[in-house]
Image: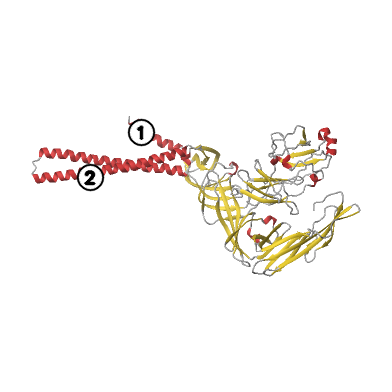
Amino acid sequence: MKNYIYILLLIPFTLFANDKKIPSKIKEVTVYLSGAHITRSSSFNLAAGTTELKFTGLSSKVDENSIQISGLQTVSIVSIDYGINYLDSFMVLPEASKVQDKIKELTSKIALLNNKISGLHEEELLITTNRSISATNESLNLEKLKQISTYYRERITAIKNEVFNINLEINSHNEAVRELRLQQEELTKGPAIAQGELIVKFDAPIATSLNLMISYLVTDAGWVPTYDIKSEALNSSIQLKYKANVYQNTGADWQHVKINLSTGNPIQQTTKPNIEAQYLNFVNANWYRPTAIQKSKYYYNPAVKKVIGRVTDASGQPLPGCNVVIKGTNNGTQTDLDGNYSLVITTGQELEFSYIGYTSSETPIYASIINTRMEENHAQLDEVVVVGYGRSNALSGKVAGIKIKGAPSVAQELPLYVIDGVPMPNFEEGDIDAADIQSMEVLKSENATGIYGSNASAGVILITTKKSKTENDVTHTLFAIKKPYSIASDGDIISLEINTFTLDAKYEYLAIPVINENVFLTAAFNDWEQFNLLPGEANIYFKGGFAGKTVLDPYTTAKEMTISLGIDAGITVTRKQDRNFKDKSFLGNNRILNRAYDLEIKNNKNTSVSITLMDRIPLSENNEIKVSEMETYAAEYNAKNGVLRWNLNLKSKATQKERFSYQVKYPKNKHISL
């Protein structure tokens, strides 16, 4: 019997000995623009020989190939196995663990109070028994009897009162335990939580004490640059605060750890390319022209919930009807007549822009303001004709499971649709996703029938669907944050300050009425390159107030960086065409257009201001279109891009007028984009 009890007592210790779980703690995290590098520490004693240990509580999103272990001394590693264990919520969640600890604490208190009640009952029993014995065996006088009776009454009353109060306390604790158990039930109703586990088999020549460092890469984490730009007054210096919005949803909290921020991205493919000979040959009209993989400049910002912006062509003119779609979703919109769009972000990380005759583009959702300039696709423009059935979202029909939403119906003969080289004669209004279109061109009916027959009498629309696209970028700037931080694994944004810089600025007002009839206050500064800035949203503060948002983009900035501090309603500008200036005329087979514009700018402020006024004269891309007889008057003219510039100093309440004109000559049977 004794041996049996001895074996039972040993069972818990044997089980514990075989469950060799080793604790580890996150000491340092390097957060990349996409992904993070985790460094954990663990100290333990290792016996001589082969030992298998399990490190628990790791992220469930570990890149197995990135796992490294250092600090082994003379110990070698026989094997490493990373896996994922799905645990109940109360075993993992900090709030569930706190509930469980509180239940244990209250249960212990209840047990102690019950023990106290048992002691009081024993005392009561002893008093009652002693009273009976005393009454039987002793001859008591009246005075002694009064004393004993008083003691018995007072003590018994005190015992019962104390038991009553203790029971009240026990009931209160029991009620608290009941509520905590309900909380525990709610927590355990959720799905099991994934936790990473690292099982390592060590081989030690002798018993040793190890201080290991375990490091690995994880996904679903990153940081996004953001800025606060403050100016207290005109002609004052600018304070530029460089910040980082850090997020992580790795499945493991980062508790009071050292944080580094890196501008690199180790998750991306960095294999170098090879170049081989290019051979020319004849191809069909649907031949795919490969393009170079573009350098990645921007990174997804999970804090963005709504995007607004403007889509323009290379000259800055708005593109109405441009499709803006969140990649991989049906959530999209079109630009209005001024090229503006607005889109609520629910899911997805990239925006796709597409427009007939222009090269489609993609960009990560990196800010709440994303302006895009579309480049003309000359290969498409050579064959594009206007056929009267709307914009690119007029595509309709079912093609290999792809969908286009919101297509207007067409009451006329429809063209033949050719998807990736395959004619679709029964293309019906329905579902093809514009997000899957790489390019689109329209063949004129006379060209189309020669290739596709009578089915193409109304023309042909050639659609090429998108292929996969990879973007590469490697940078190595590292920002070490001095203060330790705790960042929970919940995807919430934590804002960390990287640094604050003071910059000398040059202030001026800018007016470009051909693009925007508002007057903007701007501040320009140099020497920004030394700060390793990245594209990001900037909050603008002027004279202590919030002036709005802008996007600071070093990739599109020259040596001098200029930011907008907002619109100043105290200065007005107008641009009007002189309708009486040399009406259009004809000369032989040519049409002649004469254009003249009057610009008027007024300073309604109580102080003098410096203003840069800009406009442009169009340039010709076709030998048949001639731009001549330009009169720029007082403006500085850049013949390379056609931009006019006036540098004005306007006194308070003063008004100034400027003017320019030009002539355009082109074949009278054609139309131009003027």
In the depicted view, which residue is nearer to us: 539 or 143? 539
Q: Callout 2: helix, strand or loop?
A: helix
Q: Quadrant of the N terminus?
A: top left
Residue 20 visible in the displayed image: no
Q: Amino acid at mark 1?
A: Tyr
Outermost residue toward the top in this view: 1
Residue at the spot 29% in from the left edge and 43% down from the top edge: 166
Q: Quadrant of residue 599?
A: bottom right
Q: Which mark is residue 256?
A: none
x%, y% of residue 366? Answer: 63, 50
Instruction: Please state which amino acid type lies under the numbered disc 2.
Output: Ala
- Which residue is located at x 70 percent, y 41 percent? 434
Q: Look at discs 2 and 1 and give the one toward the viewer.
A: 2
Label 1 neighbourhood size at 10 Å, few (<14), some (14-19), many (20+)?
A: few
Q: Name which residue lies at 74% across and 34% down.
A: 427
Q: Is residue 557 above or below residue 233?
A: above
Q: What sort of colour scheme is used for the picture?
A: secondary structure
Name the residue carrying label 1.
Answer: 6
SS for tag 1?
A: helix
Give the left or right position of residue 61, taking residue 318 as reference. left
**Which of pointers 2 and 1 lies earlier in the amino acid sequence?**
1
What residue is disc 2 on? Answer: 158
Task: Using the image, determine if residue 367 lies above or below residue 613.
Answer: above
The answer to which of 347 and 67 lies nearer the viewer is 347
- Give percent across and percent down for residue 131: 15, 40
Determine if residue 665 is in view.
Answer: yes
Instruction: Give the total of numbered labels.
Output: 2
